[in-house]
């Protein structure tokens, strides 16, 4: 039996966010650009440069795919989905 995917928290309240990424990833760049343009303050973990970051990501998701945005500890993958969620989040007034 396959485990169901976790429910992504709604963007309507302030959330704890962490973005797992690495600088040479074009999909990560897309997410980072959206974060800047939206004026959000999102801590990052670089899976190539920071010791243990990749292992943390694999432990939490079962894979090393980036970008991965953790929203209150729940992972959201795929850059387009992350950018869409961040836009909704910023629209709800969660700017830094």
Image (tube, grey):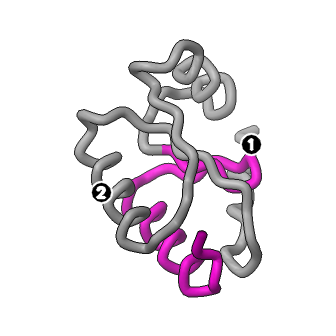
Going 54% across and 13% down the picture, which residue do you hit?
Answer: 51
Q: Residue at x 52, y 21 (%)?
A: 54
Residue on which disc 1 sits: 3
Residue 52 sits in quarter = top right
Instruction: Give the SS element for disc 2.
Output: helix
Q: Can you give x and y, in whole percent of width and height, for residue 26 in the image?
A: 23, 45
* Closest to the observer, 36 or 60: 36
Quarter of the image with the N terminus is top right
Tell me which numbered mark, 2 or 1, is placed earlier along the sequence.
1
- Find out whether the residues at labels 2 and 1 contact each other: C-beta distance under 8 Å: no
Q: Which residue is mark 2?
A: 30
Secondary structure beneath label 1: loop
In this view, the mark in front (2 or 1): 2
Residue at 71% x, 73% y: name it: 10
Note whether 37 is above or below 61 in the view shown: below
Q: Position of residue 67 (x, y in %)?
A: 43, 44
Q: Which residues are magenta?
A: 68-96
Q: Residue furthest top?
A: 51
Q: As displayed, is residue 27 above or below residue 38?
A: above
Q: From what the image shows, is residue 47 above or below residue 16? A: above
């Amino acid at each position: 039996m396959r485990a169901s995917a976790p429910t992504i928290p709604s963007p309507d309240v302030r959330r704890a966010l962490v973005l797992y990424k690495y600088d040479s990833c074009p999909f990560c760049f897309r997410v980072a650009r959206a974060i800047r343009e939206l004026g959000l303050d999102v801590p990052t973990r670089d899976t190539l440069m920071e010791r243990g970051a990749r292992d943390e990501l694999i432990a939490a998701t079962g894979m090393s795919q980036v970008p991965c945005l953790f929203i209150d500890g729940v992972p959201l993958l795929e850059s387009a989905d992350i950018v869409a969620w961040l836009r909704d989040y910023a629209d709800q007034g969660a700017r830094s």
